[in-house]
Image (tube, grey):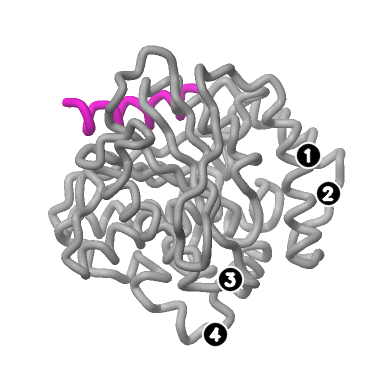
Amino acid sequence: MAALDPHMAEILRLIARLDLPPYEAMSPAEARAAAEERNRFWNEGSPEVAVVRDVDIPGPDGRMRVRLYEPDGVPATAPGILYLHGGGWVICSLDTHDGVCRRLANASGLRVASLDYRLAPEHPFPAPLDDCLAAVRWLRAHGRTLGLDPDRLALAGDSAGANLALATLLALRERGEARPATAALIYGAFSSDLASPSHRIYGGGEYILSAATMRWFWGQYVPDPAQRDQPLVSPLLADLRGLPPLYVAAAELDPLRDDSERLAGRLALAGVDFDYRLWRGVCHACIMMSRMLPAANAQIAAVAEHLRRRLTG
């Protein structure tokens, strides 16, 4: 068994003492409220950013909210990052990932636009993906109004957000549309396969995310199991040729670890330029835990360095 980062071990002991009910034991509304409450702790003491403001942009089903993070010293128009939060397509929000986006903006020196996409089960596949596509298209056409150079745009996302980021790239490629210049895919859910070795080893619930919770998430996002093999649902099954350079990160003690490792292998076969990192000793959701996990700041800095280099190099 892999060795736990000592700070990660303390976090797991804290979570175990709290004896929190799993999300799959709740309704989606209850799970969202629980996720907001649980993540409020991790966002306390998050760093200041020069400007943080919410704006509305048009979406497929009305207005969508985007939270823009603008660090000190960024030019009037500069490269930027569209961030897609995780949460199994069901939970989490701009608020749960506020600390992550603040740290990413400061570490990269770039503007970060975090998207409040629609959530399942009220809005199952393809609604969240449609929102992500609409956001990219709007930023390509109007990003300069927010200080974002539409020709130097990156995607980034964690967990379900990494799934949506990769699916967005694939959908834009298939439709012959301009794509972001790069993307960072952080411990993504790229397949509905819950029988992988990493699910068997780390999916029992001891390491924050469980296979049971992932099964519940998939059931909310794509209720019909027959539809889960679609490439835009499970990007691991897609033709990956022609994608832009990617940063792929996996947490070592994560049921989703094999998704990222398999993706890295398929990217290599497809001839895609990518950088794969295995973050040792940590679990799923680790980048949200900077308050107690020093490694999280290093992880965010590594993502920021990749995106900055690809966008400005």
Q: Which residue type carries mark 1?
A: Ile
Q: Which mark is residue 224?
A: 4
Of pointers 2 and 4, the one earlier in the residue sequence: 2
Image position of 298 (left or right of 23): left
Q: Main secondary structure of the magenta part?
A: helix
Q: Which mark is residue 123?
A: 3
In the displayed structure, would residue 297 be above or below residue 244?
A: above
Q: Which mark is residue 15?
A: 1
Question: Residue 65, how many percent across, how many down?
Answer: 54, 48
Q: Which residue is mark 2?
A: 20
**Which of 65/79 is in front?**
65
Badge 1 marks a residue whose secondary structure is: helix
Question: Residue 149, how many percent across, how many down?
Answer: 25, 35
Of pointers 3 and 2, the one earlier in the residue sequence: 2
The magenta-colored residue range is: 297-313
| Dot 2 and dot 1 residues touching (CB under 8 Å) | yes
Of pointers 4 and 1, the one earlier in the residue sequence: 1
Q: Residues within 10 Å of mark 3 (few under 14, many from 20)?
A: some
Q: Which residue type carries mark 4?
A: Asp
Q: Quadrant of the N terminus?
A: top right
Q: CA distance from mark 3 to mark 4?
A: 14 Å
Q: Which residue type carries mark 3?
A: His
For discs 1 and 3, the disc positioned in front in the rendered view: 3
Q: Which residue type carries mark 2?
A: Leu
Q: CA distance from mark 2 to mark 1?
A: 7 Å
For discs 3 and 2, the disc positioned in front in the rendered view: 3
In the displayed structure, would residue 107 be above or below residue 174?
A: above
Q: Residue at x 50, y 17 (%)?
A: 50
Q: Is residue 296 visible?
A: no
Q: Residue at x 61, y 75 (%)?
A: 219
Q: Quadrant of residue 54?
A: top right
